[in-house]
Image (spheres, rainbow, N blue to C red):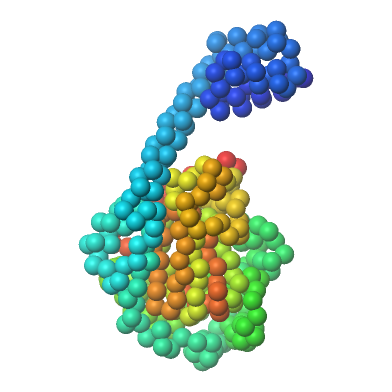
Amino acid sequence: MSQSDKRALLAEGLAAGDDDAALHARLVAAGVSAAAAKYEVDRLAKDPMAATLRKQAARLAKQGWLLANQQRLALEADGGFALDTLDRPEPAHFYRHHYEANRPAKLVGIVDHWPALSRWSLDHFAGVAGNAVVEAQVERERDPDYEIAKDGHRRLVRFAELIDWLRADAPSNDIYLTAYNSGTNAAALGALWDDLAPIDLLGDRGGGRDGFFWLGPKGTLTPWHHDLTNNLLVQVIGRKRVRMAPPWAFARMRNSHHCFSDWGNDALPHGAGDADTPPVLETVIGPGEGVFLPVGWWHQVEALDLSASMSFTSFRRSNAHVEDYASYGPL
């Protein structure tokens, strides 16, 4: 075994929190003689990089203990690990017990005053904005990393052509108008914002016109990821299944790049999870219903029908979490 291979094994062991005996056993298991393994481990006593790795491993172990306590408290709470449903919640209650507490919730009765609930349909879209050119994510099904590589899937299409394609009502994950396309679509589809109105939980900020429009067929899937802001997702047409996993399950979320999870489109089961899978909350939202997705909560969203939604980030509290987020590469 080369010296660099030995050093790599030692680095892995130090990062994992191995003591000297465990480091020695790790080397011997890889084929290093007992004497050579002792020599390599003894050298670490004077290596400042080894000392730094050991300190970092201790910090991570402490963080793991803190997250485990958060899990224990969540599972032992009254009602267990569950998703609250709030009917026309008072803003003070919502912000105190959910926004500031970083707890998701299903919300009903918050957009009953929206004209969109009775107006929005494919015919309505065609009538008010059919001639518009919109941006969509396309050819997603040929790319297993379509969400990570979303810049390469952006295409301009006539809204009327997309609507005609959606009329077939065929399940697909191949084309989707998402929040990522809003730079183009907020202007092109401005007439649709006339069908919205301010949401009490959000206050007067934006007047309902600062949301992000989502439109796609049954079968669109947004894979497991976490957002860099708090989000409110509101359903207008059709239903979406939303699965959520808490930040304290980070170690089981297989986060290997930026804010994305290697679980991808896997339908992780609802429940408390186990040693390998995270605890998962699940709900289905239909027209007029919404879900609050707190910053850092992992989630996956699946359209169960032809679906049109709006999402919002303009809360009454600061939502500037992205400003101090580093754009992490491989983790």
Indicate the position of residue 318 as horizontal and vertical percent values.
31, 55
The residue at the point 35 percent across, 66 percent down is 85
Query: What number of labels is visible?
Result: 0
For this view, does 173 lie left or right of residue 61?
right
Residue in front for this viewpoint, 77 or 325: 77
Indicate the position of residue 150 as horizontal and vertical percent values.
61, 61
The residue at the point 44 percent across, 72 percent down is 285
For this view, does 256 lie left or right of residue 119?
right
Rendered view: 173 above or below 279 = below
The residue at the point 66 percent across, 21 percent down is 26
Residue in front for this viewpoint, 189 or 140: 140
The N terminus is located in which quarter? top right
The residue at the point 65 percent across, 74 percent down is 172
Residue in front for this viewpoint, 185 or 163: 163
The C terminus is located in which quarter? top right
Q: Is residue 311 visible?
A: no
Rendered view: 277 above or below 45 = below
Indicate the position of residue 296 as horizontal and vertical percent values.
44, 51
The image quadrant of residue 49 is: top right
Indicate the position of residue 116 as horizontal and vertical percent values.
41, 84
Q: Is residue 273 visible?
A: yes
